[in-house]
Image (tube, rainbow, N blue to C red):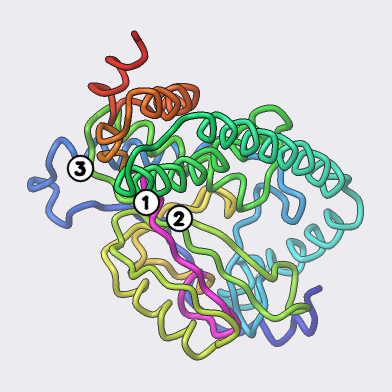
Amino acid sequence: MLRNLNLLFIAGAAYKKTLVFAENCSTVSPEEILSQEILEEICQGEAINASNKPTFLRVGAQYNMVVPISCLSGYDNKCEPEVAIWDAFLKNNDNSKKLDDARGQQNARWIKWQSETKTKFSQLSVSSFFQQSNTNILFSNLEVLRLAFLKMQTIIEDKIGNCGEQNMMAAIKILEQAQKHNLKLTIQTVILRAEPNLGYVNDHMFLVINGGLSVVDIQDDSIKTWTYLRSLKKSSGFICDRWNQGLLTKASDDETYLYHTTTFWSSVKVDTFDFDFSKLKTLPVSLQKIFCEELEKMNLSKDSAETCDRVLKI
């Protein structure tokens, strides 16, 4: 829980919401305009109930704690009331149980899907090491997508989700729209963890779009984590965080201090939300068909449309 809030009532940078793909609007291409519209629609979409924060509350970080954004801009008439609202929300809502139940169902579906899909693959022969290697790579990609899809289903069916569910739903939707409109949008997932008992939030997950971040897995090293996150501040990417009151901003413009400036994150894991199924056509048709059937269930077969259109008709 938040402690010693009076320490937070100091001058700080007020948050401003901006998203500009190019400084000179006359140079913005139709693809950039469409990309901006898609990101705004998805990342700033309809609020979803969370178990750890009221939907209307935007948060930042200061003095090793996650706090309402109003507490970063000095003592005003919003900070104390918002802290009180957050405390009351955590004490009086039953969203934690609802989310735990939803995640239990999600995990059961995940285990069932893994078992059934691996059984399908095991019943088919793979004739060469090359094909086996490509199958393993493609299946790993498929697992990532399927887990994200299940998180999205949790939100759709149960109307609840924290940062992981909300931002993985955003990733799937961005990927779907990027395919639909042939846009080049690189999606990366960033998972942060802190030492326990540092405030309301001890871990967080969000998306970076077109940030070009290095893929890393830094554990229990706050100095290395802070140094790495500084590269996010300097990147040309965009932070997408549906959980944080639909935040979408250039990383270099963000002033919440939650994502890259604070020093209390001790671990960071960054992955590219990969959707490279270009090796699909190197596999036997029977294997191609399994992959295409799974991608079609998630409405994500467009990038492999030529291959999937052919094999699904067989």
- Label 3, label 1: how many angstroms apart (C-alpha)? 15 Å
Whole-percent x, y for residue 149 in the image:
55, 36
Pick the front one: 169 or 293: 293
Residue span colored magenta: 259-275
Asked if disc 3 and disc 1 are in contact, CB closer than 8 Å, the reply is no
**Identity of the residue furthest to the left in this view:** 27
Asked if disc 2 and disc 1 are in contact, CB closer than 8 Å, the reply is yes
**Which amino acid does the dot numbered 1 rest on?**
Ile
Q: Vertical placement of 17 versus 65: above or below?
A: above
Along the polypeptide, which appears first: circle 3 or circle 1? 3
Pointer 2 residue: 207
- What residue is at 66 percent from the left and 39 percent from the top? 110
Along the polypeptide, which appears first: circle 2 or circle 3? 3
Q: Is residue 69 left or right of residue 37?
A: right
Q: Which mark is residue 200?
A: none
**Identity of the residue furthest to the right in this view:** 92
Pick the front one: 74 or 312: 312
Q: Is residue 225 left or right of residue 232?
A: right
**Which amino acid does the dot numbered 2 rest on?**
Leu
Pointer 3 residue: 32
Q: Which mark is residue 187?
A: 1
Q: Is residue 42 left or right of residue 181?
A: right
Q: Vertical placement of 12 versus 215: above or below?
A: below
**Which amino acid does the dot numbered 3 rest on?**
Glu
